[in-house]
Amino acid sequence: MSTINNGVNVQALLDAREVLKGAPEAAQFTWRASSTWQNGVHSTVTIQKFFGLGQEQAHKTETVFSADHPEVFAAEDNGVTPIEYLLVGLASCLTAGVASVAQNRGIQLRSVESTVEGNHDIRGILGVDSDVRNGYNDVKVTFNIDADASKEEIEALVAQSQKRSAVYDALTNPTNVTVEVA
Amino acid sequence: MSRSRSPEGGRAIEHTTTVVVGGGHAGIAASHFLSNRSIDHIVLERGEVANSWRHERWDSLRLLTPNWLSRLPGHRYDGPDPDGYMTRGEVVEFIERFAAVSDAPVRTDTAVTSVRPTDGGYHVTTSQGDIRCRAVVLASGACNLPTVPQFADAVPASVEQLTPFDYRSPDQLPAGGVLVVGASATGVQLAAELRRSGRHVILSVGEHVRLPRRYRGRDVLWWMYASGVWDQRHDEVDDLTRARRLPSPQLVGTSERTTLDLNALTAMDVELVGRFAAVRDGCALFSGGLRNVCSLADLKMKRLLATFDEWARTYGRDAEVDPAEQFAPTRVPDSTRLQLDLRSGEIRTIVWATGFRPDYRWLDVPVVDEKGRLRHEGGVVDSPGLYALGLPLLRRRKSTFIHGIEDDAREVVDHLARHLAVGRSS
């Protein structure tokens, strides 16, 4: 088991799990993003600071995301569509889960690729039909994994990664959202 | 036993060596081993022997284990149908008979209202008076209270809400659809029964344990028993906290020995939805993650059955069972409903089959954690002279099954006897 390496420090995660069992307050994180309108439907969103383990934290560098809409939406396409960012979050979260679970189970990964498709009926956001929802109707993720493991072990990796995924949970379960004007 | 005046000058305080709380199969098994060792004791029962089976379960409930597994210390099923499953009434009779055979000193209609530590033991307050003792065995059960999520409060008043403690049979429900929440043994049994009564039934499914009733021609619980999976000890289990929280498997005891998994319910036109996550503006919101909880359950079942196959191969038992079998994956609808307007009248009743928990409100000993779980190591509670029996995976995977109590009760009473001996010699 110690001979395999997917680059995930599972021991640190297991240690954190033990520590946080007795310190739930340290487990409270707040993730933050700050957005600035540019022009039209284009905005930029920056992410660097967050709160966790009882104090302010920061990523090594600030990341700036550009969000816009494609030309078929009569926009300038300065960046990806906001709803596409959900796909970025889901794919990367599940992939991180696959790597972590594989490391914990002693499975060496050679490649992990996935495609994520979200089916979206835009009549909702355009107000064409009030029975059509604004968000995705369904999302499909397809993994292609090459690893030293049986098909069933790989299926179990993917199932377990969904079970422990923050973004999967945020997409499949309702979340209380408050939007206010400061 | 002896009596002395209480210090307060009130009712006499009774003295005994050990008090057993609960007159179900676990309490009486404890009594059996205490009697074997001539340890003076009393079994206190709030109602009648096997009280939960009499008063707190639904009419059609049968044991999940076949009759041949109905084995208690010094008492076992010897009727004509070893492969059948006892009805609720038969279980009551079986445990009553066990109490009689064991000559257990059971005091019925004696509710324990407090257990607190005193010098060298415990002070037990009951509805019938006070008792001082050196040791206490908690055998009051794992399923004293139904667990219902907080958001049940937000369900509109027009929808009737029941727990398995209130539910007896479909007749008692108002006409109309039913939402059954939870897909463990309780949830799948009630969903099937309510569907058969002609109602529209929606079943909300979270993580669950899928099992076929029979595998390779044998009851699946025969495999659990014969292969030794059930004997796996608490100190051999990888993640004990998780294993102790495992929901009961999707099983039902019927004469046809049918499987009652989600595919069986889908075939009966029960509608599956994801885990019930919240109530918002009078609407029930369900998780979109049904497919994954079904995949997890399918994969786990496959692994368990593969363990059985390997055991049969290794121990040369292949000849006495049928060839290996494969079961179809759980059929999950392409898209499941994510919300249900509870005010629309589509469903009139919610049945919360969302689990049970023990009740320790009367236990005035600081041994219960923030989640309401007893702190114990294989039934030896974190307070000298205090013991527990009949909790999930207390000492073994079989701990909560009828036949699982014998080994646990013997070992817990062994420990209790050593505790008493050490106390005397010091």
Image (cartoon, coloured by chain):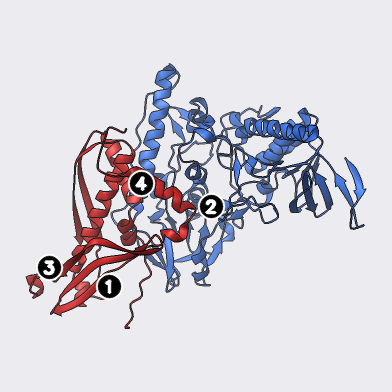
Q: Is residue A120 visible?
A: no
Mark toward the viewer: 2 or 3: 3
State the separation of the CA atoms marked 4 and 2: 34 Å
Mark carried by residue A12: 4
State the separation of the CA atoms marked 2 and 1: 36 Å
Label pair 1/3, CB-CB below 8 angstroms = no
Secondary structure of the residue carrying tag 3 is loop
| Residue B120 found in image quarter | top right
Quadrant housing the C terminus of chain A: bottom left
- Please give the residue where the numbered disc 2 appears in the rendered image: B355
State the separation of the CA atoms marked 2 and 3: 48 Å
Mark carried by residue A79: 3
> Residue A106 in the image: x percent, y percent?
31, 35
- The subunit letter for the residue under badge 3 reads A
Q: Amino acid at mark 1?
A: Asp
| Residue sitting at x 36%, y 47% | A13
Label pair 4/2, CB-CB below 8 angstroms = no
Chain identifier, red in the render: A
Q: Colour of chain B?
A: blue
Mark carried by residue A131: 1
Mark 4, other Cα within 10 Å: few <14 / some 14–19 / many ≥20: few
Left or right: where B116 falls relative to B62:
right
Mark toward the viewer: 4 or 2: 4
Residues indicated by labels 4 and 2 sit on the same polypeptide chain: no
Left or right: where A3 falls relative to B344:
left
Q: Is residue B377 visible?
A: yes
